[in-house]
Image: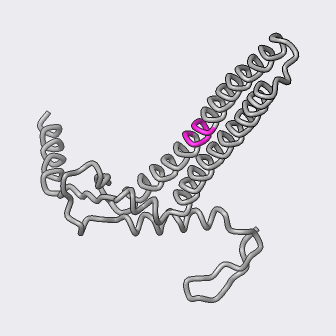
Amino acid sequence: MALAILSMSAAAQEVAVKPFNVRYIDEDRLYQQYVVAQQYLQLQSQLKNDLQQAEKKKRTQIENFYNQVQTKYKNNQYKTQKALEADQKKLETMQENAQKEMEALQKKYEQQLNQEQMKLANEIDLFLADYAVKNDYDAILRKESAMFINPKWDVTDEVAEGLNARYNAANAPTGVAQPKEDGNATPAQP
């Protein structure tokens, strides 16, 4: 029993003596520097643009058909009321279908972005966990979640460099000479 108290006391002293080692990252800056985050932001922009283009195309098709109906009506080209009503019904169907297609496309893009965002967040989280252990940090915080953190504890640039190095290593073509630390190239391992 005395041994257990002594060992708990030693553990408590170690915790009391060792300072809490904390760093932080600035997520906005990290996203600006990390290649994969930049690719995600480009994808987000591209999908938004694609959605706007698809919406514009649908709107133009509907407007063109609407104008055709209006022109036919003004020029008394409808032989029967039934023909006019058929075109009006077709216009309504076009609008309903366009709305459904746009909602489905938006949902598809949102799912794709969510999936990519989760992959990005997981890559960053895994790297930060390894980075924290390697550097003996007790915590790595997000700057955005704090009122104030001393800038000297900012590790954003180091994390971005590490993430980019990991990304570049994972995506390096095989068989290409890789530079050594002394600057001389060595053949890549297959």
Nearer-the-camera pick, 188 or 153: 153
Q: Judge left or right: residue 122 versus residue 91.
A: left
Whole-percent x and y of residue 155? 34, 65
Is 97 located above or below residue 47 in the figure? above
Is 1 located above or below residue 90 in the figure? below
Residue at the far front: name it: 75
Q: What residue lies at 58% left-to-right and 45% top-to-bottom?
A: 116
Whole-percent x and y of residue 43? 60, 52
Asked whether 113 falls inside the magenta stretch, the response is yes
Whole-percent x and y of residue 132? 37, 57
Main SS, magenta region, reads helix
Nearer-the-camera pick, 11 or 37: 37
Q: What residue lies at 63% left-to-right and 89% top-to-bottom?
A: 184
Asked whether 165 falls inside the magenta stretch, the response is no
Residue 71: quadrant of the picture:
top right
Nearer-the-camera pick, 135 or 35: 35
Whole-percent x and y of residue 126? 48, 50
Q: Judge left or right: residue 182 versus residue 95.
A: left
Q: Quadrant of the N terminus?
A: top left
Q: Quadrant of the C terminus?
A: bottom right
Q: What residue lies at 73% left-to-right and 69% top-to-bottom?
A: 173
Q: Which residues are magenta?
A: 109-114
How was the colour assigned to the protein in this rendering? one colour
